[in-house]
């Protein structure tokens, strides 16, 4: 993932501090599902240690791993956009320590402070754009006749 999508580079120090005031530390064992595609998205995480695989259900197959995320990266963006439903699934691929955020208080702070809200929206928007690009490339690698090269 590009550095522009990590919290440390996407938010200035004041905005990071405002966000981190809402964080709590959590941990997950390898194999723990953080969320499932199609379920309610009401929280998000920033990885401190370990890795998390984002996956997509594929009928008749095992879930396709779209991307693996690690240190400093945002896990989950569906909490930010109605209808607040997870678009992918996520599973810890190693022991994970993370900061967890309840979406409600973060969205409330975004409403109270428009500058903070714009910064969060820009950050999450960059993450969504990067993840869509990564998903396209990965799915082409998995299912296109000749990988993600030229479609001609």
Image: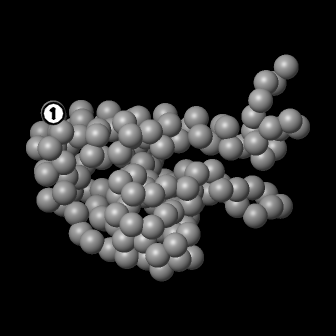
Q: Up-down: is 48 above or below 74?
A: below
Residue 87 located left or right of residue 149: left
Residue 37: percent from the left, percent from the top? 58, 59
Residue 26 located left or right of residue 33: left
Residue at (35%, 58%) from the top-left corner?
46
Q: Up-down: is 18 above or below 100?
A: above
Residue 71: percent from the left, percent from the top? 39, 57
**SS for callout 1:** helix
Furthest residue in direction top, as rendered: 152
Residue 58 located left or right of residue 25: right
Q: Which part of the image, by quadrant, shows the C terminus?
A: top right
> Coloured how?
one colour
Residue 90 located left or right of residue 49: right
Residue 139 vs residue 108, the one in the foreground: 139
Residue 33: percent from the left, percent from the top? 53, 71
Disc 1 target residue: 115
Residue 122: percent from the left, percent from the top? 32, 33
Q: Quadrant of residue 59?
A: bottom right
Furthest residue in direction right, as rendered: 145
Residue at (16%, 34%) from the top-left corner?
114
């Amino acid at each position: 993932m590009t550095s522009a999508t990590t919290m440390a580079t996407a938010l200035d120090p004041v905005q990071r501090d405002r966000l981190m005031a809402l964080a709590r530390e959590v941990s997950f064992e390898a194999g723990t599902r953080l969320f499932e595609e199609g379920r309610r998205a009401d929280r998000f995480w920033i990885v401190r240690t370990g890795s998390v695989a984002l996956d997509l259900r594929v009928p008749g197959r095992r879930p396709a791993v779209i991307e693996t995320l690690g240190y400093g990266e945002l896990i989950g963006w569906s909490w930010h956009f109605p209808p607040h439903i997870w678009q992918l699934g996520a599973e810890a691929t190693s022991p994970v320590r993370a900061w967890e955020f309840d979406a409600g208080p973060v969205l409330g702070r975004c409403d109270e402070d428009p500058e903070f809200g714009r910064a969060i929206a820009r950050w999450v928007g960059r993450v969504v754009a990067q993840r869509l690009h990564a998903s396209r490339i990965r799915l082409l690698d998995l299912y296109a006749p000749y990988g993600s090269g030229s479609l001609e």
